[in-house]
Image (tube, grey):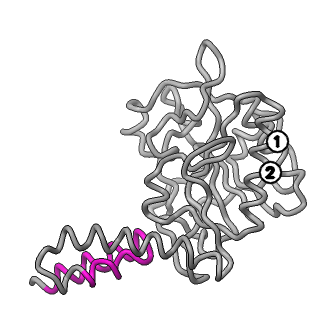
């Protein structure tokens, strides 16, 4: 049972971080397992920052402006890696938003892991080659734009279509889907309003970028913001919802 539990932890760390299981294996060979795991994980994390660019992936910034990860957790779990080209797209669009709308901070969510095409970034169906990235919506309150704010702690699962108890009838109900509504969570998120002006501007900038091939946003939400572009797609009824974030890919 002990080895079964250790195997589970190894698999879990590998699924969550891709390389965290290596640090766990190092810790298993020592007596002070927790301390050694923390130190080994830090060493692995530092090594990844150096090694990933050698195989074509770079880390999006954890701090700073006008672009940064929405939470340091994405950096700690090494989910903030993308190809150099996609990193340039994200930096360019964030800079353009900051110049067009003073004080705007663009927040990135899940990118990819640092190594190996085809390695899944759960729970996503894609995000396995460094060419996909999620960006958070912009939000505001009655006083105006809220810099670097999201409704939920990680930028996901605060679904705009479900506000005020609305019924989501975009897709037929089925068990074989990742289109969770998580209705039981919706009432606890921050009561920020979607900043439609900034969010629409961001999507238009992405659509105008020749390096971007597809953008996923729920069609009713895109229509409500006056968006219409061939790159703007519906991800399908079996994939996750996209009325809580923007998905773009090269």
Q: Residues within 10 Å of mark 2 (few under 14, many from 20)?
A: some
Is disc 1 placed on a helix, strand or loop? helix
Total number of numbered discs in the rendering = 2
- Residue 144 appears left or right of 95: left
**Quadrant location of residue 182?**
top left
Q: Is residue 203 above or below residue 46?
A: above
Q: Residues within 10 Å of mark 1 (few under 14, many from 20)?
A: some
Give the quadrant of the C terminus: bottom right
Q: Which residue is mark 1?
A: 96
Which residue is drawn at the image coordinates 48% and 76% (left, top)?
47
Is disc 2 placed on a helix, strand or loop? helix
Q: Which residue is mark 2?
A: 92
- Residue 246 appears left or right of 159: right
Which residue is drawn at the image coordinates 82% and 34% (left, top)?
99
- Residue 241 appears left or right of 131: left
In magenta segment, residue 25: yes
Residue occupying the far top of the picture? 143
Mark 1 and mark 2: Cα distance apart in space: 6 Å
Identify the magenta region. 3-26
Q: Nearer the viewer, residue 182 or 107?
A: 107
Question: Residue 59 in the image: x percent, y percent?
Answer: 60, 64
**Quadrant location of residue 184?**
top left
């Amino acid at each position: 049972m002990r080895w079964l539990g250790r195997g589970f932890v190894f698999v879990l760390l590998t699924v969550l971080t891709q390389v965290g299981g290596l640090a766990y294996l190092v810790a298993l060979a020592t007596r002070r397992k927790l301390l050694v795991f923390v130190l080994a994980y830090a060493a692995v994390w530092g090594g990844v920052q150096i090694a990933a660019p050698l195989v074509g992936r770079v880390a999006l910034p954890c701090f700073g402006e006008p672009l940064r990860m929405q939470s340091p957790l994405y950096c700690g779990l090494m989910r903030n890696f993308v190809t150099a080209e996609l990193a340039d797209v994200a930096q360019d669009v964030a800079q353009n938003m900051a110049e067009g709308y003073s004080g705007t901070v663009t927040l990135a969510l899940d990118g990819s892991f640092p190594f190996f095409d085809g390695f899944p970034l759960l729970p996503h169906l894609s995000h396995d080659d460094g060419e996909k990235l999620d960006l958070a919506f912009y939000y505001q309150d009655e006083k105006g734009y809220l810099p670097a704010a999201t409704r939920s702690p990680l930028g996901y699962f605060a679904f705009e279509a479900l506000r005020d108890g609305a019924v989501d009838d975009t897709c037929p109900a089925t068990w074989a889907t990742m289109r969770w509504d998580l209705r039981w969570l919706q009432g606890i998120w921050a009561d920020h309003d979607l900043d439609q002006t900034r969010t629409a501007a961001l999507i238009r900038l992405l659509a105008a970028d020749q390096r971007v091939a597809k953008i996923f946003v729920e069609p009713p939400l895109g229509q409500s913001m006056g968006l219409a572009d061939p790159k703007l797609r519906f991800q399908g009824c079996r994939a996750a919802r996209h009325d809580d974030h923007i998905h773009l890919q090269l």
